Amino acid sequence: MNFTKSLLFFVTILLLFQCSPPKEGDATTATTSESRKDVHSYAEPEKALTKHLYLNLEADFDKKILRGFASFDIENNQADKIIFDIRNLNIEKVTMGDDATPTTFEIGAEKEFMGQPLEVAITPTTKKVTIHYSTNPNAQAVDWLNPQQTAGKKHPFLFTQGQAVLTRTWIPCQDSPGIRITYNATMKVPKDLMAVMSASNPKAKNETGVYNFEMKQPIPPYLIALAIGDLSFGEIGARTAVYAEPSMLDASVYEFADMEKMLIAAEELYGKYLWERYDVIVLPPSFPFGGMENPRLTFATPTIIAGDRSLTALIAHELAHSWSGNLVTNATWNDFWLNEGFTVYFERRIMEALYGEEYANMLAVLGFQDLEADVKDIGAHDKDTHLHLNLNGRDPDDGMTDIAYEKGAYFLMMLEDKVGREKMDVFLKTYFEKHKFQTLTTSEFVKYLNKNLLEANQVEVDIDEWIYGPGIPANVRKVTTAKFKNVDAGLKTILDGKSVKSLATKDWTTHEWLHFIRQLPTENKNGLMEKLDAEFKFSESGNSEILAAWFEVSIKNGYANNILPKIENFLVSVGRRKFLTPLYRAFKENNGLETARNIYKKARPNYHSVSTGTMDKLLNVKM
C-alpha cells in the first residue's frame, strides 16, 4: 500500500471510530460528532481490523472446554500490534502469517465484565494472526449441560450465547457490534452428537463427528453461535426448518408451521431475505432468552412450545432481526434500540400480515404494559429510560430492557402516524437496502431520518423527546383492542361478585388470558385466586407465559403459599430471564426474599450466566 492510500485509509477509519460524542438531546447536530468508539471493546480497529475468522475447535465434554485455534485475516494499517478482547481464555501461543511465525503477546489487566485485552505483536505487513487457546470450564457464554438437563436425558448438550460481550469468553476476537467479519469453522464433537452454528449447517449427523461451517455474510462477533447435541432436522418450507432433540422435533415442527409464511410476509414488507436459509433450533430450558437472532439459525427457548402456536410472535421477532440487527446493526451498545425497536415494530407488522390487525394490537398493548412496568421500575426520569443510552463503565447487558424494545417500537409507530404507513414502509425498505451489512449510530440514523422521511414529507417531530428524553412521551400512540375490552368487562363482573364460571372464555387466546391475569388485583379478596385456579387450572398450565404471569400475581397477592411447590418447580426448570426476574423480584418485594434465595440456591446450577448475573444482583447473592 503506498503512502497516499495509507493516509486515506487511516483518515477514513479515524472518522468512523474516533469522532467526539454528541451533546445529549442535540439530535439534529450530533450526527458528525457522535463517537463510534466502542467503550466495551479493547480493540483498536483503526490500526488493525479483523475481517475473516477461521475457527477450528474440539469440544471436550468431560473437561467442559473448547480447544483449538482462531485464525484471523486482518486489515493492517501498518500497525505493530493488534488488540483482541478475551475473558477467561487460556492463550497458549500466537503466530503470524501463513507460515505460522511465532510472535509475542501480552494480556492486560482485567476489568469487570470486559475481560482483558490481548495485545499481539505484528509487523506492518502482517495479514494473518492465529491464536491457539482453550476455554475455561465456566466460560460465561458457554452452557455445558449434563443429560438430565436435556429433553432426551441421554446425551450432553452445549450452546453458546454471545450477546452482548460474551463471545470473547469462547473466541478471542474484536468483540464489538461495530466490527463485522465473515467466518469458516470446523468443529470436532462426540460422534453421537451433531454441531450447528450461525452459518451453513448439516441436516444430519455424520460418522466422523467433524462438521464444517461457512458464514459468507459479514456479521458482528456477538452473532457467532454454536450448539452441540443430539439433534434432528425437521423441514418446514423451502427455506425454513427446525432443529431439536428427537423427542421435541414433532412438537417443534407443528408449532412453527407458519415460519415460511412469516419469511414471505417479511420479504413483502421490507425486501429480499439475504441469508439464504432461516432455521430455528429449540434449545434446552436453561437458554436465558426467548430467542437469539443468530443469522441463519435462531436459537429459541422451549418455553414457546405451547402446543397451540400461540407464542410464535417470538419467531416473527427473531426473523425480523434478519433485517434490523443482523443486516443493519447498532454500532455500539448505546445504540441497542436501533436493533430491538425496529425489530418489535417489524415483528408486529409480520403478525398483522398473517393474523390480522386485532392480533397485532393485542401484542402492542401487552408490549406497552411491559414498557410501563419497566419505566416504573427504572424510574420515569432516569436516563436509562432514554432510547440512546450511556453505558460507559457498565455492563451493556444493563441496557437490554423493554425501553429499547417497546419505546423504540412505539417511536416508529408514532412516525408511521405522522407520515402514513405507505411512506413509512418505503422509508424502512430503503433504509434496510441502503445500510445492509453496515453498522449505524443513533445520530447517524437521526440524520438519515430527518433527510429521508421528515424533511422529505415536511413533518416535524420532537425527536429529542423520544430518543434523548426519559419516560414515555405524551404523543405515544394509544393502541386499543376490542378483545381486551371484552376481557376487562368480564373481569369487572367477577370483581363485582359474579361467579368466575360466568366468564365467556371459550375463544380466548393466550394474549387475552395474559391481559386478564395482569389486571387481577394485588389483594386476594374473597378467595378469588382459589376460585380462578380451580376453574381455569392456571397453576397447571402448559403455557409458560400464562404460568409466569399467574405466578407473579400469586406472589404479589399472597396466593403463592398455596402453590409454592409449583412456583419452585417452574423456577428450577426454566432459565429464561424474562420469567425469572419478575418472579424473584416479586418475592423480594413481598416479604419473600428468604424463600426466593432458597429456591435460587436449587435453581442456579440450571441457569446460564446471563441469568445468574441478573439474579445474583437482584437477590444480593454472592457465589
Image (cartoon, rainbow, N blue to C red):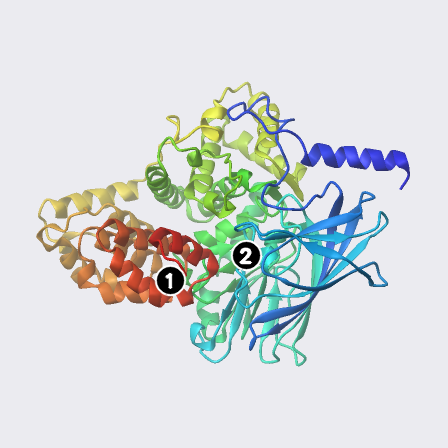
* Rendered image quadrant of residue 68: bottom right
Q: Which class describes the residues within 10 Å of circle 1: few (<14), some (14-19), or many (20+)? A: some
* Rendered image quadrant of residue 39: top right
Q: Quadrant of the C terminus?
A: bottom left
How far apart marks 1 and 2 lie (CA) works out to 19 Å
Instruction: Estimate the x, y position of residue 209 in percent, counting from the top left.
Output: 65, 77
What residue sits 27% from the left and 62% below the top? 567
Q: Amino acid at mark 2?
A: Glu
Q: Amino acid at mark 1?
A: Ala
Q: Which residue is mark 2?
A: 260
Q: Quadrant of the N terminus?
A: top right
Q: Which class describes the residues within 10 Å of circle 2: few (<14), some (14-19), or many (20+)? A: some
Locate residue 577 relative to residue 487 in the image: left or right: right
Locate residue 489 relative to residue 358 in the image: left or right: left
Front-lying residue, 533 or 372: 372
Mark closer to the observer (1, 2) = 1
Q: For numbered disc 1, what is the local secondary structure?
A: loop
What number is the disc on residue 64?
Answer: none
Locate residue 146 relative to residue 86 in the image: left or right: left
Front-lying residue, 337 or 281: 337
What residue sits 26% from the left and 55% below the top? 593
Front-lying residue, 230 or 21: 21
Q: Which residue is mark 1?
A: 306
* Rendered image quadrant of residue 303: bottom left
Residue 216 visible in rendering: no
Residue 391 visible in rendering: yes
Instruction: Estimate the x, y position of residue 494 in percent, counting from the top left.
Output: 13, 48
Instruction: Estimate the x, y position of residue 400 in percent, counting from the top left.
Output: 47, 45
